[in-house]
Amino acid sequence: MAEFDLIARIKARARQRSDVALGIGDDAALLLPPVGHQLAVTCDSLNVGVHFAVDAAPADIGWKALAVNLSDLAAMGATPAWVLLALTMPQADAVFVDGFLDGFCELAELADVALVGGDTTHGPLSVTVTALGFVPDGAALTRAGAQVGDIVCVSGTLGDAAAALHLLQQQVESDPPAVHALRARMQRPTPRLSLGVALRHRAHAAIDLSDGLLADLGHLAGASGVGIELEAEALPCSTALAAMFDPIERLRYQATGGDDYELAFSLPMEQLDTLRAVLGEGGVSLQRIGRVVAGEGVRLRDAQGVSILFKQQGWEHFSESGA
Ligand code: ADP
Ligand code: MG
């Protein structure tokens, strides 16, 4: 199969939007951003052997490649609109592309994003997505802006994906429902798009959790010029994680495990109830996990107030420990 046949396959399944004047097929896409908005743009790659296993299901790779990018837009308070897909493959593999599109297009439909272009090349399997979204002028959230006295909150639960990766490496079978649930969180993370929008004008700072809670909140604290104190007992834990690991073990995944794709944010305490009301019954759960203090860095404390330290704060590429 030739490159152009693959592109035709992709184009046939690409979601359309009325703000795309010209999509896949020309030298560049022509797009119609709404007035009074800023364009939020982000790009993330997934590489075989690093971000997914050689035998990962193509549909899961497709979902995740889009999800991690939409998560970045959510963290900025942006509404996603358009995406570009750069696919590098060892051979022109239509079966892989069809499977990949199953997952990619499923999430694209849910999030209402149009695939407007990309690139298809030859080489070791690698997927790069560029995502573009809108945020009203002045409403974008950044990592800077956390204020002393804010509370720090996180969506969903923490550590599930990292625990799933660990179990996979130990070759634990996925039969128990808890293992299955953890694995689903690793393979199909949920970008918190509604939450990101609801955080506009309410949160002071936000970040999505890709490298681990302590590492990512360290970025937020650094950008904001503040310190953060977290209570270990407050970190949200899924029933699946609690079923598979004792409290000490699971705390390491919750605090330092990567690939959560939850949002962490700081805001004035009185905003939390409003936020929950805006998100409504079906909205993602929100947990208060700590507070913003004067100083620098992130400290995690147990119920007695004793600091808990981990050898590694989170996932880092190019680190010597090989994480
Ligand atoms: P050019 O050589 O001008 O860059 P290409 O042959 O690479 O054009 O691509 C032709 C068209 O198909 C372009 O509109 C491009 O954006 C689109 N395209 C190529 N690969 C992909 C892909 N993997 N996903 C979506 N669109 C793609
Ligand atoms: Mg090209």
Image (cartoon, rainbow, N blue to C red):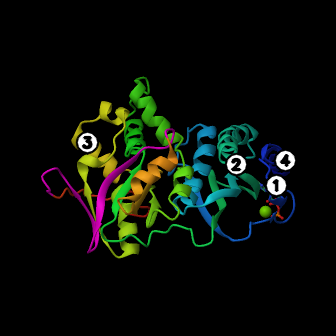
Lower position in the chain sequence, tag 1 or tag 3: 1
User: In the rendered image, which residue does mark 2 sit on?
Assistant: 112
Between the C-alphas of marks 4 and 3, the distance is: 48 Å
Mark 4: secondary structure? helix
As drawn, the label of residue 8 is 4
Disc with the residue nearer the chain's start (3 vs 2): 2
The span from disc 2 to disc 4 (Cα, nearest Å) is 21 Å
* Crowd rating for badge 4 (residues with CA inside 10 Å; few <14, some 14–19, many 20+): few
Q: Residue at x 47, y 47 (%)?
A: 277
Question: Does the Cβ of the disc 3 residue fall within 8 Å of ligand 1?
Answer: no
Q: Along the line of sight, which residue is nearer the eye, 98 or 108?
A: 108
Query: Looking at the figure, which quarter contains the C terminus?
Result: bottom left
State whether residue 212 appears in this view: no
* Badge 1 element: loop
Residue type, numbered disc 1:
Ser
Q: Which residue is mark 1?
A: 18
- At 38% from the left edge and 36% from the top edge, which residue is drawn? 167
Residue 318: mark in rendering: none
Q: Earlier in the sequence, mark 2 or mark 4?
A: 4
Residue interval drawn in magenta: 281-306
In the image, ligand 1 is in what quadrant?
bottom right
Name the mark on residue 249: 3
Mark 1 or mark 4, earlier in chain: 4
* Image spot of residue 78 (x, y percent): 60, 61
